[in-house]
Amino acid sequence: DGVSTDSNNYIINQPKIDKFVSYIGRVDQAWNNNHHSYFEYRYNDLNELAGDPFGPNNILVGAYLTRTNIGATLDHTWVLRSNLLLSLVGNLTSWKTTSYSPANAAGVSAGSFGFSSQFEAQQLGSGLPALTGLFTTLGNTLGPSYENGYNYEGRASLHQIHGNDPQH
């Protein structure tokens, strides 16, 4: 309409496609009437091209991100009395994140985009330099980045049941 604040903004016409894989498995075991356990395993893997409104063929913007996490939980519930339960839980999750710019991918050279061979010889690594404009930066001066980590927890809780109302 020409009068709104976003009337001249670029609209992304291409749908964003992220590849996401997730597996979850769980095994429950009732050892007897008073002891119950379960083990759960989780695996998730996300691959996405982020920050690239012009599509995957434009190597000047965006970053490829891969995020993988793996986790496991072990839980055991013990019935101490008919109105008293003890729950023990252990959990471990690890993750790995990798990101890189298509501007620094293998086979991308500044010379193929019009930069001189002298400029290419001075680069620490192959790829396109970052060109900073008024509102954005095209290209990338960084190489790939990696982040790894883990989280663990253990907890115990005692549940007292009064009548039909469980209290923690």
Image (cartoon, grey):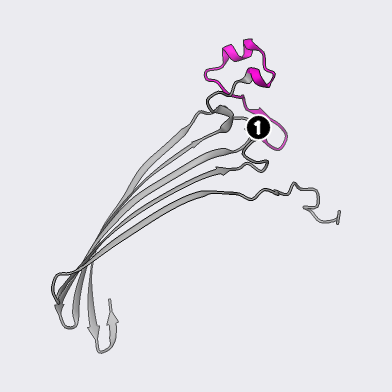
Q: Secondary structure at mark 1?
A: strand
User: Which image quadrant for residue 38?
Assistant: bottom left
Q: Which residue is mark 1?
A: 138
User: Which image quadrant for residue 136?
Assistant: top right
User: Which image quadrant for residue 140?
Assistant: top right
Q: Is residue 114 magenta?
A: yes
Horizontal side, residue 132 vs residue 164: left or right: right
Q: Is residue 51 above or below residue 143?
A: below
What residue is rendered at 34% in x and 49% in y? 70
x then y, percent, for residue 111:
64, 17
What residue is rendered at 61% in x and 49% in y? 16
x then y, percent, for residue 74:
24, 60
Q: Is residue 16 magenta?
A: no
Magenta part of the chain: 111-137
Q: Amino acid at mark 1?
A: Leu
x then y, percent, for residue 54:
68, 41
Horizontal side, residue 55 vs residue 66: left or right: right
Horizontal side, residue 82 vs residue 8: left or right: left
Q: Is residue 89 above or below residue 35?
A: above
